[in-house]
Image: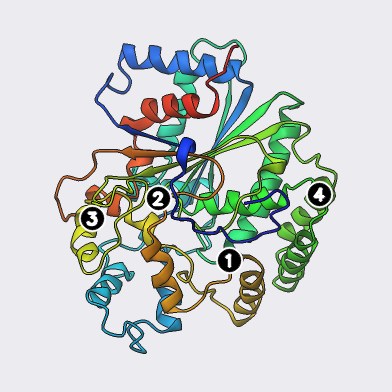
Amino acid sequence: MPNENNFQHDELSRKSPGERLTAAELTGGALPESPAWFESMAQRGTALSQAGVRAIVFLHGSIHGSDLFGMQRLDEAGGLKRGYSRGVSGVDALLAAMRAGDNGIPALQGGITPPLSNNDATRKTIDDQAGEAGNFTNAYVALFQQAINKQLSHPIVCRRILWASEHHHLGRATAAVRLLHDLHSLSEGQQFDKGDRILVQAHGQAGLILALASNLLCPSPITKRPKLLGLLTTHAEQQGQADLAAAIRRIEPLLASHSLLNGATLDVVTMGTPVRYGWDLSGMGRLLHIVNHRNLRTDGKTWLAKMELPQVTMEMPIAWGGDYVQTLAVAGSDAVPATEAAKAVNKAVWEMVEPYDGFERWLECARRAVRFPSEGSCLLVDYKDCTNSTNVHEHYYGHTAYTRSNAMLFNTSEILRALYKDAGH
């Protein structure tokens, strides 16, 4: 995507990423929390510090209690209800397997539903129920922070942020604004300056929040930024969300003057993020996309997922080809906002950021099987999470391997290689 992308959707190119692409496998290595593991993590912490990384933010939502595959919008637009499958073999069974309540992923305990609050109680509920499945737990972040800072006199700050998990355009745009406000507060509080770097690791649809944020960070006076912020401000005021309206007013002039992060640079790693919104790298630093992937194709296009019906309906329950949420939660899918007012604003944001709608357009996007956006480095990883088990809690359709402790050292090593290979030089 170009500089001054101005919220254009990604082009969903099936071409090889070329030199942007590498592949790796999760190997055994040192056991987490063993002396060798701590030593290796400490070495990587030193390298991150030498690269200028001063803070690492872990951004995630909740797989439980949310419409993970975006079936609400597909049902609303047509799908099974209106017969849009038109006899495509296997698609009815696929849609049924994606639907909340039928996909094996239970609701959150206590009846908690999006928008989720980024507070201790909600995070604890998710930690207790989901563990490390698509979730950066308090224990995970504490262990990471302890390990990377073992040899550092000036520790790297580590933060965990739970986003509201509203899987629609309005929800993601609102989350992007809140995140940028949080990053501004972090930069001020830590007195970051030019040469300092903030690294955000974003799981799943949290990566889409960063894609929107990258467009908001564009240093040029793009036309859609004031339009989007105006829509969000008006909606926040009408809904009595004074904190959100205040956050937008705080960051809007800072975005215009390109001073939001006090001169620090934002780097981003996405993990299992569907390809939807376009990225704008003109106002940020380095970008890496990691996708859980096992090649099942016979045409040599190893960088694409295999989205062939009806086979995908049989492969998905055992995560045979990797991350199926990344493949299927694409344009046209989404949760549906709860109120008519939110639906209206969501539609307005939708018209700015995504040209695709309807069941057939979703099927078209899914069958393109694109793993990576048009910008950023690309890493295909076999996380070895396919055990041929149909127990969803073992793999959550390939979408949870990224956030488990057994992958912490591996992920940190790959992030260093991809983004900071010149660290210390």
Which residue in the structure is indicated by mark 4? 220
Amino acid on which the number 2 mark rests in the picture = Ile
Q: Which mark is residue 52?
A: none
Amino acid on which the number 3 mark rests in the picture = Val
Amino acid on which the number 4 mark rests in the picture = Ser
- Residue at position x 76%, y 26% in the image: 193
Q: Position of residue 388 (x, y in %)?
A: 14, 49
Q: Position of residue 65 (x, y in %)?
A: 39, 62
How far separated are the C-alphas under marks 3 and 2?
Answer: 17 Å
User: In the image, 4: left or right of 305?
Assistant: right
Element type at mark 3: helix
Q: Position of residue 82 (x, y in %)?
A: 37, 89
- Residue at position x 72%, y 23% in the image: 195
First in residue order: circle 2 vs circle 4: 2
Which residue in the structure is indicated by mark 3? 392
Asked if labels 2 and 3 touch by Cβ distance under 8 angstroms, the answer is no
Which residue in the structure is indicated by mark 1? 169
How far separated are the C-alphas under marks 2 and 1?
Answer: 23 Å
* Mark whose residue sits in front, 3 or 4: 4
* Mark whose residue sits in front, 2 or 4: 4
